[in-house]
Image: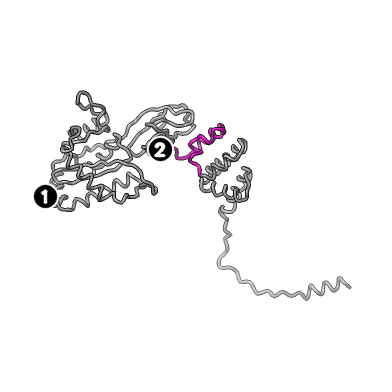
């Protein structure tokens, strides 16, 4: 669950049959990067690598099958070579070959995901999951009458030592930025910025993030990796607003418009093209200096006054800034000087008035 909404995800569970110790990681998708990142983090946590790992038939590891032979994808082959483990795969429709891990998946689901937890950051939550698994391993083995963690300690003596060289779980590719400043990755479009229109950039794809880099592999932007389909991924629309303003008649069909609060959508649709451009220029100015929340607050004031003029919208924003801006404090000397009490005496004033009248 994220932000109070249910979000679909996937499990990765690794079990060690001798000790019955199990470790789980969760991801938004079932990509090769997710599989390898999860295994890497578990290996690092337990301090070694099983000599042989039996996998279910994962598309994240198997490129394709031909005449019942599995062909491993290049990334998985490099990963297994780096960590020196042997990969085996279960036969299709052979649940008996993976009973131990299937039981562990059900156990984790019942104990740690009911009720559904709030997970604002999957990478951080996965670290938490590893600690939860350690705690769970303190219980007694169902058959051997010893603590699972004690059995695991004996089992780790037979693990392959970790490679001293860090393995980077990432895929690098080159892509061309389209005329709107986005690059296609999977089925989604990620914002690079209009500055890089029609240029080639490097992309670095990891389990959780997408990094966009120039030709020298210097980072331009980064985004959380999106596993839903046909989405525009953009941390800020500021760079794209000039292009949107130029094509003002298509505004309501843009993803930018769809992401706006309802109050902004209704306001913009009421305006003619000329005023709509003005309103977007005001919005651009506010977003450059403040936030969409401030822009919406200022717009609400305009609507409450039953006005629509974008010029007044800009005036309202300046008034808001004037009222909320920093104030210079007057420095007073300390201690303050003592001032004698002064009593008002109007007698002299009265005498002067009398002389003038005479």
Marks 2 and 1 sit apart, C-alpha to C-alpha, by 49 Å
Q: Which residue is mark 1?
A: 143
Its colouring scheme is one colour
Mark 2, secondary structure of its residue = strand
Q: Main secondary structure of the magenta part?
A: helix
Label 2: which residue? 222
**Magenta stretch in the rendered image:** 233-261
Furthest toward the right, the residue is 358
Location of residue 210 (image quadrant): top left
Could you tell me residue 344's position as x and y percent?
A: 72, 74
- Report the side of 192 relative to 328 (left or right): left
- Count neighbours of disc 2 (C-alpha within 10 A) and say few if under 14, some if 14 to 19, many if 20 or more: some
Instruction: Count every numbered label the image shows and give the total.
Output: 2
Disc 2 to disc 1: CB gap under 8 Å:
no
In the figure, 109 relative to 54: above or below? Answer: below
Give the percent coordinates (x, y) of residue 230.
41, 34
User: Measured from the top left, where is residue 324 in percent x and y?
Assistant: 56, 53
- Residue 35: where, in percent of width, then height? 27, 37
Q: Nearer the viewer, residue 272 or 174?
A: 272
Q: Which mark is residue 159?
A: none
Identity of the residue furthest to the left in this view: 144
User: On screen, 199 above or below 40?
Assistant: above
Mark 1 secondary-structure assignment: loop
Hey, which quadrant is residue 249 in on the image? Answer: top right
């Amino acid at each position: 669950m994220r932000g109070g909404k249910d979000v679909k995800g996937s499990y990765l569970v690794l079990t060690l049959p001798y000790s019955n110790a199990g470790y789980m990681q969760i991801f938004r998708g079932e990509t090769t990067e997710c599989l390898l990142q999860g295994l890497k983090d578990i290996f690092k946590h337990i301090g070694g690598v099983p000599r042989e790992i039996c996998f279910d038939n994962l598309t994240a590891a198997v490129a394709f099958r031909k005449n019942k032979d599995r062909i491993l994808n290049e990334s998985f082959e490099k990963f297994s070579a780096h960590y020196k483990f042997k990969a085996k795969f279960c036969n299709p429709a052979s649940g008996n070959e993976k009973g131990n891990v299937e039981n562990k998946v059900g156990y984790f689901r019942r104990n740690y995901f009911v009720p559904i937890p709030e997970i604002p950051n999957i990478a951080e939550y996965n670290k938490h999951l590893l600690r939860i698994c350690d705690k769970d391993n303190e219980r007694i083995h169902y058959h051997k009458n010893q603590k699972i963690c004690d059995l695991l300690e004996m089992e780790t003596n037979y693990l392959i030592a970790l490679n001293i060289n860090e393995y980077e779980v990432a895929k690098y590719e080159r892509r061309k930025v389209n005329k709107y400043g986005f690059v296609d990755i999977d089925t989604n479009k990620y914002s690079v910025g209009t500055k890089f229109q029609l240029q080639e950039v490097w992309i670095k794809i990891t389990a959780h993030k997408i990094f966009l880099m120039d030709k020298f592999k210097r980072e331009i932007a980064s985004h959380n990796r999106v596993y839903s389909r046909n989405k525009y991924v953009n941390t800020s629309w500021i760079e794209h607003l000039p292009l949107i303003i130029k094509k003002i008649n298509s505004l309501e069909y843009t993803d930018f418009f769809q992401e706006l609060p309802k109050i902004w959508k209704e306001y913009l649709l009421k305006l003619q093209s000329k005023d709509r451009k003005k309103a977007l220029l005001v919005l651009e100015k506010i977003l450059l200096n403040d936030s969409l929340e401030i822009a919406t607050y200022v717009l609400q004031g305009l609507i409450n006054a039953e006005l629509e003029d974008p010029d007044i919208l800009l005036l309202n924003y300046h008034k808001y800034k004037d009222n909320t801006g920093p104030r210079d404090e007057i420095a007073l000397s300390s201690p303050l000087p003592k001032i004698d009490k002064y009593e008002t005496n109007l007698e002299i004033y009265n005498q002067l008035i009398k002389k003038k009248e005479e």
